[in-house]
Amino acid sequence: MSAIEAKIRGWDGERLLIQHHAVVDAWIVVAIHSSVLGPATGGTRLRSYPDLDAVIEDALRLSEGMTYKYAVAGFPRGGGKAVLACRTDLPAADRSVLLRSYGLLLRDLGGQFQTGPDVGTSSEDMDIIAQTGAPYVFSRTPAAGGAGSSGPYTALGVLAGIEVACQHVFGDSSLRGRSVLIQGLGGVGAPLAKHLLEADAVVMVSDPRPDARAAFGRAPDIRVVEPQDVYSTPCDVFSPCALGGILSHDTVLHLACRIVAGGANNQLRSADVAEHLAARGILYIPDFVLNIGGAMAITGIEAMGWSQQEAATRVRDSVRMSLRDVLSVVTDQGVLPDHAARQVAEARLEARRARIETNA
Ligand code: PHE
């Protein structure tokens, strides 16, 4: 059995769709992991991958992450994720063609998978997808009737989580004087840096893209860390806000921080890295506990009638509450945060499954 076949067989999701777009030579993969708590919802990622196996693997893991994210927070949504895999230099016209084909697929799915932006896609892209008649495309531009980008709300939740983590480790939730190193100045990292500066934290940022760094390098209070030093630079909190899989046995060996708390999805390269982090005395805050802000706020605003203000408050309160729950399981049962968070999520899913069965 091939490695990818084993992964698909081992995945406990509901539906996996794989489509090749011949004209632009791209893959469209939609992974619907769970609709137990509500309609499967998750971002649409667009980037290049080494091969189809890597695309499928990413979609499977990310979709599961979405299920856990909503379950930990007790938010009535299920998990799913879409990945559009294409070459890096895809011309703009081909990109639109790909987004429109994907929109038609979502339209056919009739709301079984509901989406928003993710790494490599924007609110403008959501507009293009929604123009095909695809329902439940979140985070469209305000001009198209959407709530705009989700990154700032994710950043709010990550900030609230960092405060709770600091309370747990240092006995003080204040970020004044705390050093926080943000990896990745994208949709989440950039607004997070701003909030941290406002909280008088010592902010360090690292991003391999020169333009992203230039914008922040000019700000007098931010220290720019070279990408090769991002894991070894001493700080109180390391905050991964770029791509996943960055916490491996190799990188963890170099970390010189007390807390890892960031917005990127799937930060652990493999599950056993969580043990390595604990052995090094580093508190790892599971990504899916921290990064629900964007998905929660945008679906709340667009599908549940929340105001922007209400969305911001709910995101902060929700992350604070679920992280406190998780950390109390950590303290009471002596388990790793990753296990504790999965335990909390599984319990919510199980309770819902039991209720569904009783009603049937
Ligand atoms: N990118 C978001 C996440 O990973 C997904 C999302 C954004 C879903 C906006 C809905 C609306 O959580």
Image: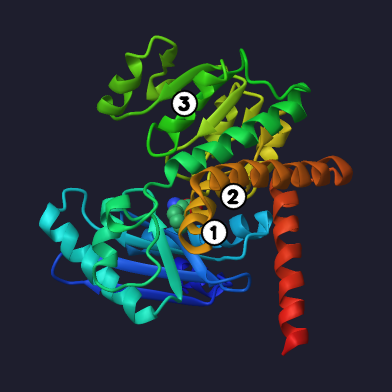
Percent x, y of residue 48: 28, 52
Find residue 288 and name its label: 2
> What residue did someone put label 3 on?
193
Q: Do we see residue 60 in this rendering?
A: no
Residue drawn at (53%, 72%) of the image: 39
Residue drawn at (76%, 30%) of the image: 168
Q: Residue furthest top?
A: 220
Q: Amino acid at mark 3?
A: Ala
> What residue did someone put label 1 on?
66
Q: Amino acid at mark 1?
A: Met
Secondary structure found at label 3 = helix
Asked if the beta carbon under badge 1 is closer than 8 A to the nearest atom of ligand 1, the reply is: yes
Disc 2 versus disc 3: distance between alpha carbons? 20 Å
Percent x, y of residue 158: 57, 37
Neighbours of disc 3 within 10 Å: few (<14), some (14-19), many (20+): many
Q: Amino acid at mark 2?
A: Phe
Residue drawn at (44%, 38%) of the image: 188
User: Do tag 1 and tag 2 residues touch (Cβ < 8 Å)?
Assistant: yes
Neighbours of disc 1 within 10 Å: few (<14), some (14-19), many (20+): many
Nearest to viewer (mark 2 / mark 3): 3
- Residue 169 falls in image quadrant: top right
Residue drawn at (41%, 31%) of the image: 190
Q: Is residue 156 above or below residue 306?
A: above
Disc 3 versus disc 1: distance between alpha carbons? 24 Å
Percent x, y of residue 327: 77, 41
Neighbours of disc 2 within 10 Å: few (<14), some (14-19), many (20+): many
Q: Is residue 260 above or below residue 96?
A: above
Find residue 226 and name its label: none
